[in-house]
C-alpha cells in the first residue's frame, strides 16, 4: 500500500512539474539583430494539408526579409480554441479571424487589437475595395483584414455535358427554373446537394437561403434579418425558403438521392456526381473553394473544360451584382513588432500573389495582376469578386452562435419535410427572441 | 520533428527528468526530518497527512475548487451578474423538446441501452468463452475495439452506416447487408427514429470487450471445488450459473455496471464525431461543449455541467457503498 501511494505522489508531482516547466518554457524575445526584427510570431490558422503548404510558401519571403519565425498552428475548431486561449489570457499574436459574431464579442471586450494604427490605412484604402474594409470593421474600427476572398453562390456545371444535352447557361432565375424543368423532363435530376458537415451540418443549405434573401429582398432586408430585427416568419424570409423549396422540388425530387442523400452526404463530396457517366446531376451551388474538392476526387478534371460556373442568378433584377462573400481574414490579439510586421505583410499584393499563383485563392488586394491566376475559371471568379457591387458577409456567421446553429438545424429539418416550414420558422423566431440578448 | 526546437527545450527535459525526482526526494526527506522533531506520540498522526498532502492539494485545486466555481458560474449571466436559477430554467423549462430535454432523454437511452447491452453481452461472452479452448483468441478479438480511440470508432462506424441512394452500389457495410436481402438502403445516423440506437450500438461495440474481460477475470476467481460440489449435488449448468456463479460475480457486475453508467452519462466523443448532436442525438456532455465553445454561454454550460454532476453523484455514492460492503465482507 505504501508503495502505491508513493507512486501516486510521484505521478502527481511529475505532472505538476511538467505543467510548471511548460509554463516557464516560453522565453523567446524580439531581439533586433542586423536590422532585422527577429523573434517569433505565433499564428493560429485554419489551413491544413496542401493549404498549409501554400500558406507557408506565402510566409517564406517574410521570414527571409525580417528574420521573424512564424510558428504556425492549424485548427478547424477555431472559435473554440480562440475562446479558450483568449479567456486564459494566452492568445496567439495573430490568428485567422473567428466568426464575425465572436470577433465582435472580443472587440467589445477589448480582447482584439484595432488595426487602424497598425496598418497604413491610406495604402489599404487605395488597394482594397471599400466593401472589404467595411466587412472587417466594427464600430468604425478595423479589427480584421482580408487577404484572400471567396465567393458564395456559384453554380458549377459540366460544360461538356451541357453542350451534349443542348442546355444553355441561365442568365435569370426564371431561365434557371426552366432549365431545371427541362433536365427533369429528360428523366434526370438537376441538382446535387450535400448538407453533412459534422457539428456544422446544414450550412450548405443555409447558403442557398441567404443568397436568395439577398438577391430577392435586397441588402437592407438582409441586414435587418441577420441583426435579428426581421422575424423568420416574416414574408421576406419565408419567401426565400419557399423559393429554395421550388429549387428542391416537391419531396426534394429535383435533388439527386432526395432528402436521405442530402442529409447524409458531405458537402465536399456532393458535387462529384456531375462528373460521373452518365451524370447523376447537372448543377451544384457552392462557394469557389469547391473546385479543390472536384480535382481531388477526380484529378483528370480540367478547370474551365470539365467544370465551369455561373453566378446564382438574381431573383430580383433590382439587386444585380449582390454577392455573399467569405474569406481568409486575420486579426491581431497581441501587439508585438513581429505581429505588426506580419499583418502588414499579409495585406500586400506580393504576399497575396504567391497563393494566387499556386491556385485556389482569390486576392483582395487589387494590385494583384489578374493574369497571375492559373486558369480562366479562377480569373473569372476574381473578376466577379472585384466587381461585386454589393458584398455581404455570410448572414449565418453574423448571427449570434445560437441563432446560427438553429438556422443550420432548421435547414436539415426543412429538407426532410418542406410542409413543416411554418413550425420550423416559428421555432427560429423563438430562438431569435433570446439569442441576441445573451 | 524540428531538432532546433528540441535542443532549445533540452534544459527543460533535463529539469523534468532530474529535477522532479530530486524535488520529491527532498520533500520526503525534509518532511520526515521535521516529523522526527515531533514528540513520539504525534508522529503517527502527522505522517499520513504529509503523505496524502500533495494529492489532497491537487484534488482540491483541480477538482473541488473548479466544481465549486462551476456551481457559482451556473447561477450567473454571461456578464457575471447573479441571475438565480435562470440558466437552469432555460435548460429545463421547455419540457419535453426544448432546452436540454432532448439531451437528457438521449442520456437516459444511453444509460439503459449502453449499460445493459454491454453488461449483458460481456457476461454472456465471458461465461461462454470460459468453456472453449480458443478462449484467449476470441477474447482478444472482442477486446480489440477497446484499443481504438473513440474518435476513430466514430469515424469507422460512420463509414459502416454510409448511405448511397438505391440502385447505386452501397459503400456502407450495413446498407450493403440490407441490399443482400433486397431491402432499400436507409439513413442510420440522420433519421431521428433510429439514429440514437445506431450510435449507441457503435459505442457498445467498443466497450463490450472491457465488460467481458473484467467479468471473465471474476469468473476465473470462483473456486472450482464450489462448482464441483454443486454438480455432485445434482445441479444443472443453468442452475449452477444462477445460484452459484452469478451471486459470486455480483460485486464485479455491480462495479462494471456502475462504471458503464458513468461512461454512459459522460458520453461525448462518439456523438460529436458521428452527428455533432444533430438529428436529435444530442447528449448532455456535447450540449455543454456546444454551449461553452460555440455559444459562449458560460452560465448555460455550467448549468448543464451541474445537471450532469447531479446525475452522476448518486451512482458514485452507490459505488462507494458497494466498495465498502465488499471490503467489510473480507
Image (tube, coloured by chain):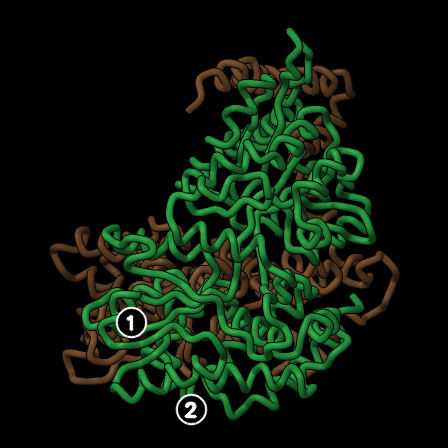
Chain colours: A green, B brown
Please say if A274 is above or below A68. Answer: below
**What chain does mark 1 sit on?**
A
Q: Position of residue A59 (x, y in %)?
A: 52, 29
Please say if A258 is above or below A10. Answer: below
Q: Quadrant of the C terminus of chain A?
A: bottom right
For the residues bearing labels 2 and 1, Cβ distance under 8 angstroms: no
Using the image as rendered, state which of residue B155 and residue A275 is in the foreground.
A275
> Going by the picture, which residue comes out furthest to the right?
B81
Using the image as rendered, state which of residue A19 and residue A164 is in the foreground.
A164
Q: Position of residue A320 (x, y in %)?
A: 60, 70
**What chain does mark 2 sit on?**
A
Find residue A437 and report its image quarter: bottom right
Find residue A242 and report its image quarter: bottom right
**Label drawn at residue A162:** 1
Image point 43% across, 47% down: which residue?
A: A360
Mark 2 falls on what kind of element? helix
Using the image as rendered, state which of residue A39 and residue B275 is in the foreground.
A39
Q: Position of residue B108 (x, y in %)?
A: 52, 75
Using the image as rendered, state which of residue B20 and residue B236 is in the foreground.
B20
Please say if A242 is above or below B140. Answer: below
Q: Is residue A418 left or right of residue B128?
A: right
Instruction: Give the distance between the C-alpha atoms of the residues marked 2 and 1, in whole angstroms.
Output: 24 Å
Circle nearer the N terminus (2, 1) = 1
Q: Are marks 2 and 1 on the same chain?
A: yes
Rate crowding at label 2 as few (under 14), some (14 to 19) or many (20 or more) other CA atoms within 10 Å: few
Mark 1 falls on what kind of element? helix
Image point 54% across, 90% down: which residue?
A: A420
The reply to whether residue B254 is in sight is no
Q: Is residue B213 left or right of residue A147?
A: left
Q: Which residue is mark 2?
A: A250
Image point 82% across, 62% down: which residue?
A: B77
Amino acid at each position: 500500500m505504501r508503495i502505491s501511494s508513493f507512486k501516486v505522489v510521484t505521478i502527481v508531482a511529475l505532472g505538476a512539474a511538467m505543467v510548471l516547466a511548460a509554463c516557464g518554457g516560453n522565453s523567446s524575445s524580439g531581439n533586433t539583430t542586423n536590422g532585422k526584427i527577429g523573434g517569433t510570431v505565433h499564428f493560429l490558422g485554419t489551413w491544413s494539408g496542401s493549404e498549409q503548404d501554400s500558406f507557408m510558401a506565402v510566409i517564406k519571403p517574410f521570414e527571409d526579409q525580417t528574420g521573424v519565425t512564424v510558428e504556425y498552428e492549424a485548427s478547424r475548431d477555431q472559435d473554440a480554441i480562440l475562446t479558450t486561449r483568449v479567456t486564459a489570457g494566452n492568445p496567439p499574436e495573430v490568428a485567422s479571424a473567428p466568426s464575425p459574431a465572436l470577433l465582435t464579442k472580443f472587440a467589445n471586450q477589448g480582447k482584439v487589437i484595432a488595426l487602424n494604427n497598425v496598418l497604413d490605412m491610406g495604402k489599404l484604402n487605395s488597394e482594397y475595395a471599400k466593401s472589404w474594409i467595411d466587412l472587417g470593421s466594427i464600430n468604425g474600427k478595423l479589427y480584421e483584414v482580408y487577404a484572400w476572398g471567396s465567393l458564395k453562390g456559384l453554380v458549377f456545371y459540366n460544360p461538356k455535358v451541357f453542350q451534349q444535352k443542348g442546355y444553355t447557361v441561365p442568365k435569370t432565375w426564371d431561365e434557371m427554373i426552366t432549365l431545371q424543368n427541362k433536365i427533369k423532363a429528360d428523366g434526370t435530376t438537376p441538382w446535387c446537394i450535400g448538407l453533412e458537415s459534422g457539428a456544422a451540418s446544414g450550412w450548405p443549405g443555409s447558403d442557398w437561403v441567404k443568397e436568395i434573401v439577398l438577391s430577392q429582398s435586397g441588402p437592407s432586408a438582409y441586414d435587418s434579418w441577420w441583426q435579428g430585427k426581421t422575424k423568420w416568419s416574416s414574408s421576406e424570409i419565408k419567401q426565400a425558403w419557399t423559393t429554395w423549396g421550388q429549387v428542391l422540388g416537391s419531396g426534394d425530387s429535383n435533388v439527386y438521392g432526395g432528402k436521405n442523400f442530402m442529409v447524409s452526404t458531405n458537402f465536399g463530396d456532393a458535387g462529384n456526381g456531375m462528373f460521373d457517366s452518365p451524370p447523376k446531376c447537372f448543377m451544384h451551388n457552392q462557394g469557389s473553394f469547391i473546385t479543390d474538392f472536384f480535382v481531388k476526387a477526380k484529378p483528370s478534371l480540367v478547370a474551365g473544360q470539365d467544370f465551369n460556373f455561373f453566378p446564382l442568378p438574381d431573383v430580383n433584377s433590382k439587386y444585380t451584382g449582390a454577392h455573399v462573400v467569405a474569406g481568409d481574414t486575420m486579426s491581431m490579439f497581441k501587439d508585438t513588432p513581429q505581429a505588426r510586421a506580419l499583418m502588414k505583410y499579409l495585406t500586400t499584393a506580393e504576399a497575396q500573389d504567391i497563393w494566387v499563383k499556386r491556385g485556389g485563392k482569390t486576392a483582395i488586394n487589387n494590385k494583384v495582376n489578374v493574369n497571375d491566376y492559373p486558369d480562366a475559371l479562377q480569373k473569372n471568379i476574381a473578376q466577379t469578386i472585384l466587381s461585386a457591387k454589393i458584398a455581404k458577409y455570410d448572414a449565418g456567421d453574423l448571427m449570434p452562435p445560437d441563432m446560427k446553429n438553429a438556422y443550420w438545424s432548421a435547414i436539415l429539418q426543412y429538407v426532410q419535410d418542406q410542409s413543416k416550414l411554418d413550425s420550423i420558422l416559428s421555432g427560429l423566431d423563438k430562438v431569435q427572441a433570446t439569442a441576441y440578448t445573451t | 520533428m524540428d531538432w532546433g526546437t528540441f535542443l532549445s527545450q533540452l534544459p527543460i527535459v533535463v529539469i523534468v527528468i532530474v529535477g522532479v525526482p530530486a524535488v520529491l526526494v527532498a520533500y520526503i526527506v525534509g518532511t520526515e526530518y521535521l516529523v522526527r522533531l515531533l514528540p513520539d506520540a504525534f508522529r503517527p498522526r502527522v505522517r499520513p497527512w504529509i503523505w496524502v498532502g500533495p494529492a489532497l492539494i491537487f484534488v482540491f485545486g483541480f477538482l473541488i475548487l473548479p466544481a465549486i466555481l462551476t456551481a457559482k458560474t451556473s447561477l450567473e449571466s454571461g456578464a457575471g451578474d447573479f441571475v438565480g436559477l435562470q440558466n437552469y430554467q432555460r435548460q429545463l423549462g421547455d419540457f419535453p423538446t426544448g432546452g436540454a430535454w432532448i439531451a437528457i432523454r438521449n442520456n437516459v437511452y444511453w444509460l439503459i441501452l449502453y449499460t445493459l447491452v454491454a453488461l449483458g453481452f460481456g457476461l454472456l461472452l465471458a461465461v461462454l468463452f470460459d468453456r472453449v479452448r480458443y478462449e484467449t483468441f476470441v477474447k482478444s478479438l472482442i477486446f480489440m475495439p477497446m484499443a481504438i480511440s473513440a474518435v476513430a470508432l466514430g469515424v469507422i462506424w460512420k463509414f459502416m452506416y454510409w448511405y448511397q441512394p438505391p440502385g447505386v452500389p452501397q459503400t456502407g457495410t450495413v446498407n450493403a447487408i440490407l441490399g443482400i436481402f433486397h431491402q432499400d438502403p436507409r439513413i442510420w445516423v440522420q433519421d431521428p427514429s433510429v439514429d440514437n440506437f445506431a450510435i449507441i450500438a457503435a459505442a457498445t461495440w467498443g466497450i463490450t470487450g472491457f465488460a467481458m474481460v473484467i467479468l471473465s477475470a471474476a469468473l476465473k476467481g470462483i473456486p472450482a471445488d464450489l462448482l464441483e460440489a454443486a454438480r455432485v449435488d445434482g445441479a444443472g449448468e443453468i442452475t449452477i450459473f444462477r445460484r452459484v456463479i452469478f451471486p459470486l460475480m455480483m460485486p464485479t457486475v455491480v462495479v462494471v455496471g456502475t462504471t458503464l453508467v458513468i461512461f454512459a452519462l459522460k458520453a461525448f466523443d462518439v456523438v460529436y464525431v458521428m452527428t455533432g448532436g444533430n438529428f436529435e442525438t444530442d447528449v448532455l456532455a456535447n450540449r455543454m461543449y456546444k454551449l461553452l465553445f460555440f455559444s459562449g454561454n458560460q452560465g448555460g454550460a455550467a448549468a448543464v455541467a451541474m445537471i450532469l454532476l447531479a446525475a452522476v453523484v448518486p451512482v458514485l455514492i452507490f459505488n462507494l457503498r458497494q466498495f465498502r460492503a465488499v471490503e467489510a465482507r473480507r
